[in-house]
Amino acid sequence: MISDILNYMFLLSLYSTMLYFVMLYCVSKGNHFSVNRKLIIASILFSTILPFIQLPSNPLALSYGVQLETIEINAQGIINQLPIVNGSFSWFYLGLCLFALGLLLSLSKLVYAIWKLSIIAKKGNKTVHDNYSIVKTFDIKQPCSFLNTIFIPDHKSYSKKELQLIVEHEKTHISLGHSYDNIFIAILQSVFWWLPTMYFWSGLAKLNHEYQVDNHIINKQDKHHYAQFLISQIYQYQKLLLVHTIYSFIKKRINMMYQKKENQQTKWVYFTFVLSICSMLFIQSCHKEKTYVVTEDAKETETNFYEESSTDTVFVFNTETKKEEQRIINSKRKIYKDPDNMPIIQDCNTVSTSFEEKTECSNNKLLQTLYKNLVYPAKGKEAGTEGMLVCDFIISDKGIIENEQIIRPLEGGFNEEVLRVINVMKKELIWEPGKVDGKNVHVKYTLPVKFKLQ
């Protein structure tokens, strides 16, 4: 569980950072602000979802069976990744508490910002128009907008032309729905408060919003006059969450107004974005390869089971010839990886009425037995050998562990040690078999064991 969370955090940070710099490049070229706006939102969502997506990997690297948590044993006898038992202290729960605290504080900050803007709107002098409202107030220091409300500082006097420019600028923000982007990103920022890139995404989205609005304004009015107006009106900055302030990113916006836009560069700008997406998909497909070897009788199929053939030699007494005869019997059986009900250790039947909780209990008890009995082989320790071993076994329709085999061996006494402990499991654990349509079935488990000297 902890390793999966850390893996997600790492991949999210990697993908989010890669896409951020690509989008920063796209926005700086200033060719298509509306397209960039959609790509920014899509990039944020894509980077958060991609680590969950299981892409197809090399089929030769797959193994058929229920994948158990990787066990790590070191030469000092210290056992890592021990499952949680009986409410003992866990770094996982500590991390969960810290995450919940950060989420609560971030969401509180977001709610407070919306509440503060609503209070300012109620206290100010409000004028209602068709699609927007103008609120004049002493509580803000520079013009801004949120949803369908435009805030104008009441202590500052503007000429008629200046006021028209301000209102036109903020009306464009309102008509384009930029506030909804800000709210959406702020919610994600609250959930992923621990990820610095989320704060960069917020700034990039607001910068692109301003580029988009400026482009709309200068298509209607003289851009030199508009640029001079922005420069002349710069004064004390006031930071307000979620709003668009007309005087933010002044230098970058003026540079963008006078930047020569070359349409032929567009294909190369967005080719970079597509290339980065392909790179992340490649990374995601690579890291999903978890198991290493496949045996001839255990190949991945599209069904929930595979058929295993076996050949047995038996001796029977022929009553007609009065002689003992040797016969070869061929048989097949279905091995499941995801039955309707997983095999359950009998001791876990009293834990809960939920099959999910019984299954989790059974997996934990199985891993506890392995942790308790596995030791680092002396031969491997002396030779300085370490590495990953993978084995599998079947819990039969009789609830018996059988057909244990090493599918990725590790020489130095490691194979023998793992098989020894599986034999201990046969004695200590009593299983109720898995079921499909109410019938007992065979279920295969795959167990990776990592031996590490340090």
Image (cartoon, helix red, strand yellow):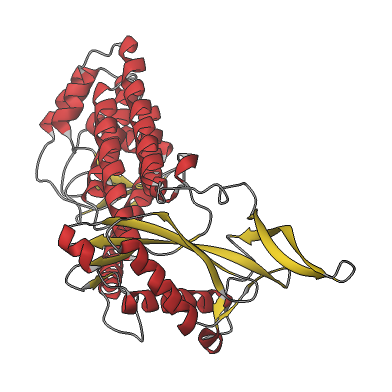
Q: Is residue 301 above or below residue 405?
A: above
Q: Residue at x 35, y 26 (%)?
A: 275
Residue 427 in picture, x, y percent from top left: 48, 83
Q: Let me know if residue 148 appears in the view.
A: no
Q: Residue at x 44, y 48 (%)?
A: 293
Q: Is residue 213 above or below residue 310?
A: above
- Of the 4 image quadrants, the one containing the N terminus is bottom left
Q: Let me know if residue 449 appears in the view.
A: yes
Q: Is residue 402 above or below residue 27?
A: below
Q: Nearer the viewer, residue 165 or 273?
A: 273
Residue 272 in picture, x, y percent from top left: 32, 24
Relative to 250, is 417 on the left or the right? Answer: right
Q: Residue furthest bottom?
A: 350
- Of the 4 image quadrants, the one containing the C terminus is bottom left
Mark count: 0
Q: Nearer the viewer, residue 437 or 32?
A: 437
Q: Residue at x 36, y 16 (%)?
A: 267
Residue 197 in picture, x, y percent from top left: 24, 46
Q: Residue furthest right?
A: 320
Q: Nearer the viewer, residue 153 or 43?
A: 43
